Amino acid sequence: MTGILAGKVALVTGAGHGIGRGHALELAKQGAKVVVNDLGGDAKGEGRGRDADVVVDLIKTRGGDAVADYGNVSDEAAADAMVKRGIDEWGRIDIVVNNAGIVRDKAIWNMSVEDFDLVMQVHLRGSWLTSRAAARHWRKIAKSGNGRYPGRIINTTSGAGLLGNFGQTNYAAAKAGIAGLTLTLSLELASIGVTANLISPGGLTRISSTIGMGAPKEPDDFDPEDFDPMDPSLGSPIVAWLASDEAQLVSGQCLRAVRDRLSVLKGWHEVAGVSSGEKRWKTEDIGRIIGTDLFGTRAPGLRLGG
Ligand SMILES: NC(=O)c1ccc[n+]([C@@H]2O[C@H](COP(=O)([O-])OP(=O)(O)OC[C@H]3O[C@@H](n4cnc5c(N)ncnc54)[C@H](O)[C@@H]3O)[C@@H](O)[C@H]2O)c1
């Protein structure tokens, strides 16, 4: 197939359903050969199955090339194997889209350690493991060649991770962690030409249906000619572009694609600051300093002579 990803090989994790399925279909449409990874469990991470097969069949029916992988992204050997699957199958891996995810929402006082750990493992550890496997592979090629490889990592964050969300201390921590992971990957891999970016997607999926948004739908349930604000594949063209050679100079960025809006988000940055004048801070002064100089909630009055 021809397109902006012709000749490339991509891994999309959690591509059996929802947003990942949309990414896999679009990457294939743009010419990439796709490793369709999916553990095949439910939205809480229970069970497993061969849900990836459906997407492989869809891609092949549409004239593309794909292979299924049923591994668990949070398992080290399985994560290494899914990256290697692209190399074994087609001799290369160019793109890693970390999308696999689950939710186990509860207010913190009701959340179990298991709910925290499993969500962290799938999202954060899973994204780290596949990124490491790909980074090791690309670095080896770069070192034995011209020092560069145009690899692409696209990680998935969310509004919960960037802004917080009630009932999601586990998920929000994992998604914020993925933002930190991605910024650091973009720094560590810049010298060999690999980019790392974040997508913050949206859509009516198995995950979002757990918060009462309605019954989930798959990207292929929507008419490609129509616009539906809940279609989980609305962000997939942005992922495909980030994966392309055209996006070589874009790294360490967070693009949010929700409904019809595409935006760039920036993280923590200083909005107000005050100097101690090279002295130690005194606890008894801090409330006044924060009120007047940082939050501006306290009138400064006349400050004469310091
Ligand atoms: N739906 C939204 O509105 C929304 C918003 C922000 C972020 N996201 C993120 O988008 C991503 C996709 O979620 P979705 O909404 O499409 O839900 P989904 O349940 O439809 O898709 C998630 C997929 O990940 C797979 N998966 C889960 N654990 C796995 C594991 N350990 N190894 C491999 N695959 C695994 C599931 O089987 C499933 O197919 C997630 O990272 C989610 O946090 C979704």
Image (spheres, grey):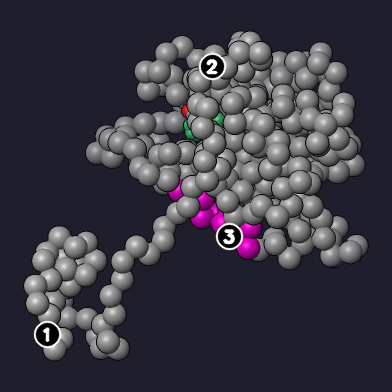
Q: State the residue in front, 292 or 165.
A: 292
x%, y% of residue 49? 63, 20
What is the magenta range?
Answer: 176-187
For mark 2, what is the residue?
228
The amino acid at mark 1 is Leu
Q: State the residue in front, 24 or 295.
A: 295
- Mark 1: which secondary structure? loop
* Disc on the earlier residue, 2 or 3: 3
The amino acid at mark 2 is Asp
Query: Residue at horizontal 17%, vertical 72%?
Result: 289
Q: Nearer the viewer, mark 2 or mark 3?
A: 2
- Mark 2: which secondary structure? loop
Q: Nearer the viewer, mark 2 or mark 1?
A: 1
Q: Say few, some or many: other residues with alpha carbon within 10 Å of mark 3 (under 14 / 14 to 19 / 20 or more).
A: some
* Disc on the earlier residue, 2 or 1: 2
Query: Residue at horizontal 35%, vertical 42%?
Result: 164
For mark 1, what is the residue?
304
Location of residue 293 with respect to 251 vertically, above or below: below
> Gap in Å between the C-alphas at discs 2 and 1?
60 Å
| In magenta stretch: residue 186 | yes
> Gap in Å between the C-alphas at discs 2 and 3?
35 Å
Q: Which mark is residue 184?
A: 3
- In which quadrant will I find the C terminus? bottom left
Tell me the chief SS of the magenta region: helix
Q: State the residue in front, 93 or 288.
A: 288
The amino acid at mark 3 is Thr
